[in-house]
Image (cartoon, rainbow, N blue to C red):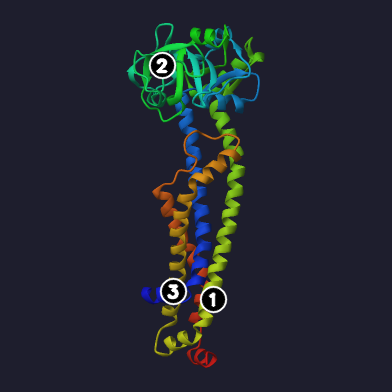
Amino acid sequence: MIRLALINLLRQKTRSSVTALGVAVAIGMLFLLLSFQRGYQDGLHSELDRLGAHLIVVPKGCPYDSASIALHGASWPCYLKSTYLTEVEQTPGVGVAAPVLMNAYFDSQTGAQSVYCGVTERILGLRPHWRFAQGGFPKLSGGILIGAELAKARGWKLQETVALPGITGRQGTVAGILAPTQGPDDFFVYLPLPDAQKLFGRPGALTHILIRLQNPDEVDKVTAALRGCDAGLEMTVVPLAHLFETIQALVRATRLLLGCITLAALLAAGAGVTNTILMAVSERTREIGILRAVGVTPGAVFGLIWLETVALCLLGSFLGIGLALIAATGVESWLRHLLPYVPTDRLLSPHLTLVLSCLIVAPLLGTLAALLPALRAARLSPALAIREAR
């Protein structure tokens, strides 16, 4: 019966191909939507884990911009006073407070941006995932700690004195090289905070303070205490978990829009499949009548039409998943321009479970699309069908 179903589909190759393509578009969109949902959430959690902080203290301004700069690296438009660090450290519930002075420089020779972070050894308390491939945190002035990808791209070695990219006439000695982190840290240059303040011409300044709490469940309590301290009016306290929840709420609107488009595409594909199979049943009225006349049961006729429909949907599903995988890079680039905040990790995370989920949708879509034409075929009267088809 499977062979007969495939032969019937191949009778009208063009019509079957166009119908399968409609299913492919719908299933491909569904696959991309599921991949986006999985990839975006995983990316947000990964960035939060890599940052290692529960709170970030930044100058007054937009917390979305500040969090994005702190995570991905860029030049800051305003600064905090170093004296604020003491108040932050003395706030009950604060476990580790790591000051950071970040700046970015454009290297005209390579066309690349180099991100520098002035930090103290406290940063190690917020980077539990950090491993040193070579050396360690710079203890002396003039030392730098570099990311794995930066060391690889520049060919820098441990204890080598190198020219700092983007900063004319400035050098540093490689005191340590980080093991790969699969994040922005792989491309950053870390140096002692006093060196950074001198290098950037920002004495006594910070761009942000990263805070790890003694008890993460007290985030609201500690946030309120920080906002109520003497320096509270001069800084913005951003709970990163709450920020990411807000970002996710904004992204849900995008996901809802994509979901509605996907649902419309599935309904259109289902209607197209139903129409195609109805036309096939109409063209094969005499054939179905002969099958019924020689003893083929209505159930068998129903099963034959159902098999044709499901086979058509499965073919479209495989094609759609393949097209989605090919188009994933372009779709991800489009989403990065569309969304207000995006993780550095891949936005689309294809996975075997997502492939299986989409392939499960195919027989469900085929079953719904097959109901009307299969019932119509099963109810045909043999004598009437043969007489009408003459």
Secondary element at tag 1: helix
Describe residue 292's horizontal placement relative to residue 237 as left or right: left
Secondary element at tag 2: strand
Q: Tell me what residue is drawn at x 50 percent, y 80 percent.
A: 377
Q: Nearer the viewer, mark 1 or mark 2?
A: 2
Q: According to the image, label 1 marks what residue?
A: 278
Q: According to the image, label 2 marks what residue?
A: 145
Q: Residues within 10 Å of mark 3 (few under 14, many from 20)?
A: few
Quadrant hosting residue 8: bottom left
Q: Which residue occupies the foreground of this view, 153 or 360?
A: 153
Residue at the front extreme of this rendering:
109
Q: Tell me what residue is drawn at x 41 percent, y 19 percent.
A: 146
Disc 3 residue type (three-letter)? Leu
Q: Which mark is residue 357?
A: none
In 3D space, how far apart are the residues under numbered discs 2 and 3 (Cα atoms)? 64 Å
Q: Mark 2 or mark 1, which is nearer the start of the sequence?
A: 2
